[in-house]
Structures are given as structure tokens and as C-alpha cells.
Image (cartoon, rainbow, N blue to C red):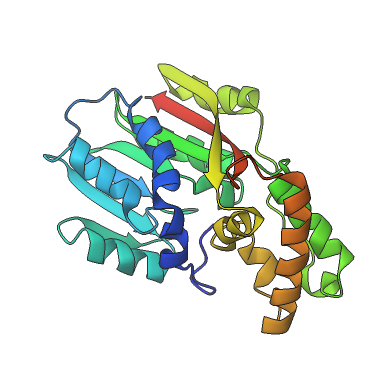
Amino acid sequence: MRSAAEDWNPKLYLKFEDERTRPPRDLLAQVPLARPRRVVDIGCGPGNSTELLVERWPQAEVTGIDSSPNMVAQATARLPAARFEQADISNWAPAEGTDVLFGNAVFQWVPDHLAVLERLLRALPEGGVLAVQMPDNVNEPSHRLMGETAASGPWAAKIGAAQRDVLPTPAEYYERLKPFARRLDIWHTLYNHPLDGAAAIAEWFKSTGLRTFLSPLSEEERAGFLADYIARVAKAYPERFDGKVLLRFPRLFIVAVR
């Protein structure tokens, strides 16, 4: 979950804005509501996903929430007509009349997020929609190599267990959410992002998955960790004919209609 104590870097996150905005765009295309009253972007980040919601439903009251003050500030500057709030998603509840809860790449950070998703779905009115997408990439080389780098260097004791948990299976989401949904769609999409070499993969994850590995380290240790990680990534993601590497990125999507 986005932590206010060790805040997120919106500019670093937005270095790959086009690639990061494609999944929420794909998720939004599957939301069946035409004219919702209130829409909430849960874990709005710097506002790139909120912007999609404002464009889709200009008549709706759109609110973005995030636990990161930096992300809320960036989103407010980007979309001054929308409303943004700092909130802890674990215990946040939607206001009455909220028809759409939209979660873009945030619930993988929330402890016991299955219970949180169930609670949020049950809070929606009949016909309301909970739409969520999450990276499902913990077993990809990009993330396995974070753990290997952490365990093999002089920084191992400082880092500890920094890896995210593997997501529950689609069957687990179905069993938990379907009793409260008239319709439930769950699917995976596998993206292949062309990036400018192994260093670009590290740059991508410096704003997300690598944060928990790097944050306990000194500047010198961070440089050593990143050099080791990039060398491992270069072997796992070979360059193509044009010098690009393909970052394989699976994501899990859920659309539940109350």
C-alpha cells in the first residue's frame, strides 16, 4: 500500500505514463455503467487513471484517494476540477450514492485485500461496480531477481522480506466476491512493454516494486544493489534487434457488478 511515511515519487512513476495508463484504460472499457453519480479512483496515484474517469463520465462527481501526500498533490495539480483526498484504503468507506469504485494497481499493496474488496463491494448500491486491476508479476524474472539480489549482497540484513505476496488465485477472488455480485468477470492480460534496455526495467520498478528493497539502504548501497540487479535483468531480458527489451507484465482484472 502506498505509504505516507516513505512517500512515492510521482515524476518517476510517470516516466512510463503511456504504459502505466493502458491497463486502467482497458479496465475502464469493461465497466458497464453509463451515468454513475459518484465515482472514486482508489489509489489514484498522480491522477493519470482519474483523468480517464473524468473523461468517461464528465457528469459524475469524481474523487481520487491515495495514502501518498505526494501523489495527491500531483493529482490535484493535474486535475484541479476533480477532488482528491489522502486516505488509508484499508479502512476507507465510500460515501452513500457511490456507483463506481475503481482501483488501478493499488490493492496488491493492501494487507488482506480480499477482505477489503469484499467490504467495498458490499457497500455499493444495487448495480454499482467495483473495477480493479493489479500486477500479477511476483513470479516474473523482474521480481524474482529483486529477491535474489537482496539475498546475495551485503545489504541482505537491512532489506529483510521486502517482496510482495503472490496474488490469490482467480478462484479465490470468485469465491469471496461472487456471493455479493450479480455479475463477476475475472481475467488476465499479459502486456509486453518494449523498453530501452535492462536499466529501463530497473527505472520502471524504482517507483514501485523496488522501493521496499531500496528504501532501507544508503545511497552507496542503493547504487550497488541497482548495478547488481541490472546485471541480472540484462541476462533475463535479452536485447532485441533494435536494442529494446520486452518487459513481460501480467495483470489481473476484476469487474464486479453488485
Residue 201 left/right relative to 66: right
Residue 96 appearing in the image: no
* Location of the C terminus (image quadrant): top left
Spot the residue most to the left.
59
Residue 126: percent from the left, percent from the top? 30, 24
Q: Residue at x 40, y 39 (%)?
A: 22
Task: Name above or below for residue 70 compared with residue 43.
Answer: below
Q: Quadrant of residue 226?
A: bottom right
* Numbered-mark total: 0
| Nearer to me, 221 or 188 | 221
Residue 34: percent from the left, percent from the top? 19, 25
Q: Residue at x 64, y 61 (%)?
A: 210
| Nearer to me, 162 or 121 | 162
Residue 210 appearing in the image: yes
Q: Residue at x 21, y 36 (%)?
A: 56
Q: Residue at x 34, y 34 (%)?
A: 124
Task: Name above or below for residue 10 compared with residue 94.
Answer: below
Spot the residue most to the top.
182
Task: Name above or below for residue 240 compared with residue 32.
Answer: below
Q: Quadrant of residue 138?
A: top right
Residue 27: percent from the left, percent from the top? 40, 32
* Location of the N terminus (image quadrant): bottom right
